[in-house]
Image (cartoon, grey):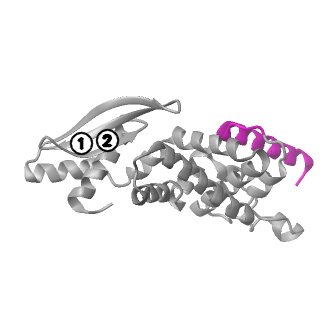
Amino acid sequence: MPLRRRHDREARIRRFIRRHFGVRPRNLAPYLEALRHSSSLGCQKDGLTSNERLEFLGDSVLDMIVVDMLFRKFPDGDEGEMTRMKARLVSRESLNLLGQEIGVEHLLDAQTGKGSVHASLRGNAMEAVVGAVYLDRGFRKTQRGVLKLLKRFDLDHRLQATVDFKSKLHEWGQKRKKKIQFKVVREFKRDGQQLYKMQVLIGGKVMGTSDGPSKKSAEQAAAREACRHIFGDD
């Protein structure tokens, strides 16, 4: 790669990490590795290391960050529910979505042919970048950066919205002539984050209660809990 192009790319990577993770890279090497897919010409010709090892590391770091967040955010949450929440947040679908939102593919060194970047490459790169931030700046700064991203894109709500539990609940209520109501029972802050506690009532009886960073996300989460009681699904 010509020197000018290399310097331009390095500058873009530095801006990308500062913008989305809130840290200034000290050592750029792990970030270059994190954004280098095994299909890149550099890997093929020069034997450079691909991002696969950093994917492995980033996957474990992400798990720890999300587990710690859920454990603190839901002090009364049961193990099974928190396990399902963690699975949604660090699923391949969520990482692919997050990678698309922040445009990680535009920095990815990969030979993708004439087609567009496959979604899984974005998710893999996201894991690798998290691993790179961890190596460069340590766990605490990585944790703050990842939580900032999750909050910024309200990812949990967007994933839940793939199944519109609120609409599903209203449709069920209309067929059975049951009155469905959503009520904000509390507005509060936790660790500086604005949260809403929402209840869903069916015929005046509370059937679901949940927190969320927005009223819509709290409604979806409460409706999801009610649907689990009614339909026995997740």
The residue under label 2 is which amino acid type? Glu
Q: Earlier in the sequence, mark 2 or mark 1?
A: 1
Q: Quadrant of the N terminus?
A: bottom right
Report the mark closest to the observer, 2 or 1: 1
| Residue found at the far front of this picture | 76
Q: Is residue 146 rendered to the left or right of residue 45?
A: left
- Tell me, for residue 39, which label it has, or none: none
Tag 2 residue: 219
Residue 221 at x, y percent in the picture: 34, 47
- Relative to 158, does residue 197 appear above or below in the rendering? above
Q: Residue at x 31, y 51 (%)?
A: 224
Q: Residues within 10 Å of mark 2 (few under 14, many from 20)?
A: many
Find the distance from the CA under tag 2 to the CA under tag 1.
8 Å
Query: Could you tell me residue 114's position as x and y percent?
Result: 66, 64
Residue contact between numbered discs 2 and 1, judged by CB atoms under 8 Å: yes
Q: Could you tell whether 86 is left or right of 134 in the image?
A: left
Residue 130 highlighted magenta (yes or no): no
Q: Which mark is residue 200?
A: 1
Residue at 54% across, 56% down: 90
Q: From what the image shows, is residue 204 above or below residue 97?
A: above
Badge 1 density bin: few <14, some 14–19, many ≥20, Cα 10 Å: many
Q: Main secondary structure of the magenta part?
A: helix
SS at mark 2 in the image: helix
Q: Amino acid at mark 1?
A: Val
Highlighted range, magenta? 1-24
Residue 6 among magenta residues: yes
- Counting from the top left corner in percent of width and height, residue 117 is at 62, 60
Q: Residue at x 28, y 48 (%)?
A: 223
